[in-house]
Amino acid sequence: MAEPLNSDVEEERERLLNSWEDAASGWGRQADSVRQRGLPVAEWMLDHAGLQPGQRVLELAAGPGDIGFMAAERILPGGTLVSSDAAEAMLEVARERAAEQGIENVSFRQLQLEWIDLETASVDVVLCRWGVMLTVDPGAALQECRRVLVPGGRAVLAVWDTPEFNPWATVPFDAMVKLGLLEEPAPGRPGMFSLAAPGKFKEMLEEAGFVEVTVEPVGIARVYDQPLEWLGETVDCSQMFGRAWRALDDDRRREVRARLDAAAREFADADGTIRIPGRSLAAVAHA
């Protein structure tokens, strides 16, 4: 694990945790759409996880829990899932969804990525989709993933590729920035694209001690019936955008919506459906 960091870093961790606690209700509202739009990445991860009956699987930064819940079905009989998140409010969303789906071979734990409170070599597979890049110290998070894996166990993770491959996320944010309503995030801080530089994700996995590392791009499509649906998902799921949006008056909101409406036309199909591309980097690595 990385050496303890200074108080500014600890304050950043606390800020991030609080923001995820606040974001949980929005993620709960969007859970079904997030599951559907992220299926190509989930399927890649599950196909590469080597899941077998009887295994113990840990999902980190699980949010609504969907990949873990899909894995839970594949490790029966006898397998168990530990669904974890740093935010207790996110865990509550996952508990409710597990109950709705009838998933019984799951326990829930409040765990941090950078110090996973589980014994060394205690899980067979670690899953983490779109979580590592949001930590203050992603290197420590990857080292912890390796520590809790049994020898030969697999970590299957995903982060976002570079901004140009993800206009579904960058266009709303850029609209706010160009109107002077948001500032560009400071370089080096945790964020959606912090591990997106070519080769960086693979290099960090190898530095954490993983072997047989494979990283592949996985394309997705965010499909919306109208720009308002795109906006609503962004407000609910992007903490920075959502906070800024809720602080705007009606005139400012109309300006943002006008820019989003104009951008949506560039991605519209003939029937008016809005289809916006996205791309993740998905990795499988062996302990």
Image: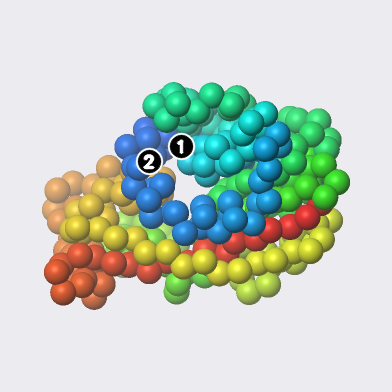
Pointer 1 residue: 64
Give residue 234's position: percent from left, percent from top.
33, 51
| Residue 80 in the image: above or below residue 150 | above
* Residue 115 appears in the picture as rendered: no
Q: Is residue 180 left or right of residue 47?
A: left
On screen, 197 above or below 188? below
Could you tell me how far apart the alpha carbons at marks 1 and 2 are, in whole angstroms? 6 Å
Q: Using the image, tell me which numbered label, if any, was put on residue 31.
A: 2
> Percent position (x, y) of residue 225?
19, 58
The disc placed on residue 268 is: none
Q: Nearer the viewer, residue 18 or 8?
A: 18
Regarding mark 2 in the picture, which secondary structure is present there?
helix
Q: Name the amino acid type tagged 2.
A: Ala
Answer with the quarter of the image where residue 174 lies.
bottom left
If the image is split into quadrants, where does the N terminus sit?
A: top right
Q: Report the residue at 70% width, 34% height from top.
A: 54
